[in-house]
Image: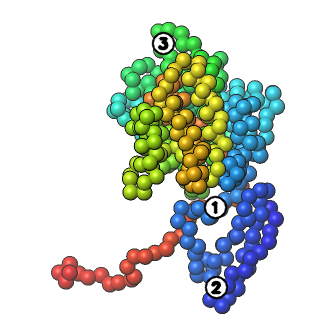
Amino acid sequence: MTEKSAQLNLGGNTLDLPIYSGTIGPDVVDVGKLTGAGVFTYDPGFVSTAACESKITYIDGGKGVLLHRGYPIDQLADNSDYLEVCYLLLYGELPSATEKQQFENTINNHTMVHEQLRNFYQGFRRDAHPMAIMCGVVGALSAFYHDSLEISDERHREIAAFRLIAKMPTLAAMCYKYSLGQPFMYPRNDLSYSENFLQMMFGVPCEEYEVNPILAKAMDKIFILHADHEQNASTSTVRLAGSSGANPFACIAAGIAALWGPAHGGANEAVLDMLTEIGDVSNVDKFVAKAKDKNDPFRLMGFGHRVYKNYDPRAKVMRETCHEVLGELGIKDPLLELAMKLEDIARSDSYFIEKNLYPNVDFYSGIILKAIGIPTSMFTVIFALARTVGWVAHWHEMISGSYRIGRPRQLYTGSPQRDFVPLDKR
């Protein structure tokens, strides 16, 4: 990290502010000295603020680039599997064959959850949203696995990471089974990560469940493509919670709560709702016109991205995977036909091009999950499952280095100081 400097003239006084350059990406100006000068920066949403230094994920939104530890996301999606990506995010390098096998064995050995944790589910209504349940049960893990809560101990942090990555599919599948009134399915150590998740979701004790390899591969790619995305709202929430010294299970539960918001984790569900509202290819032009009309509340979901001002690199992989899944299942899904029509328009219509409204990863992932048989209420849970490794990697990186408790400042616009008025004088 190289250092330059900038000068800021503030009320006749000149402040020298260090400028840091990372490996790639924009330079950042260190504004820490401003506090001593009696002023703060004002940046709603922190869109121009680097709150941390990280070596995990890099995004260039203008060029449509997403790198995990330097590796392009499309190369990882095409050549790797989810647990190998987990290893990469956690340790910084791709594993050797021996390291990969050891890591997979470790995760497999942590997939079961404490039997008493099953009782937690009984306290929720059958129609409770799965994300409400996940917030509760993930936070409760700290009550069962308190032998790995010493965050200053690197081995404790590593064990907590193993447990979270391994148990999240089990907890997620239990949410689904509970909503159906079906028995919970125990994990199977002879299956891959994505195969195991599918059998816990759709298997029943009375007969053998055979996992379709095409669906398992698609599920694995969805996990990879959602594994991490730099300093997004939920990851920043995990880091902020972790900066207080909170245990890792509580921090991940905080991340799940942030992800639950429709502006963050619910986009693929919103895409399906939108396609259902459009209904038929013949209606596409009408709804595109509505989307262009500033006075019309209708919005096209799954286009554009807060960060990417180009084609979302994950969307290309999802598009190919979507075709593979629907081809395997023999589904002629009218929603896919709609999606293809919308994508063609978005890539040729000047309105979309000028506004950089390219299809994003959520545009296709919802259709894939629907085809697999996963209900829309579970979409964000699967997002949380996949993103757990990213949350854990960022939490571990922060705790392993030097950090301070997060304390954002504010621009106060309330009443100035005033004296209290007794009740009988008001």
Identify residue for label 1.
51
**Residue at x 66%, y 59% (from the top left corner):** 52
Specify the amino acid type for callout 2. Answer: Leu
Q: Is residue 294 above or below residue 133?
A: below
Specify the amino acid type for callout 1. Answer: Ala
The reply to whether dot 3 and dot 1 touch (C-beta < 8 Å) is: no
Name the quadrant of the N terminus. Answer: bottom right
Residue 205 is tagged as 3
Q: Between residues 264 and 144, which one lies in front from this camera angle?
A: 264
Q: Quadrant of residue 361?
A: top right
Q: Is residue 417 above or below residue 201?
A: below
Q: Disc 1 on helix, strand or loop?
A: loop
Name the quadrant of the C terminus. Answer: bottom left
Q: Disc 2 on helix, strand or loop?
A: strand
Q: Disc 3 on helix, strand or loop?
A: loop
Identify residue for label 2.
10
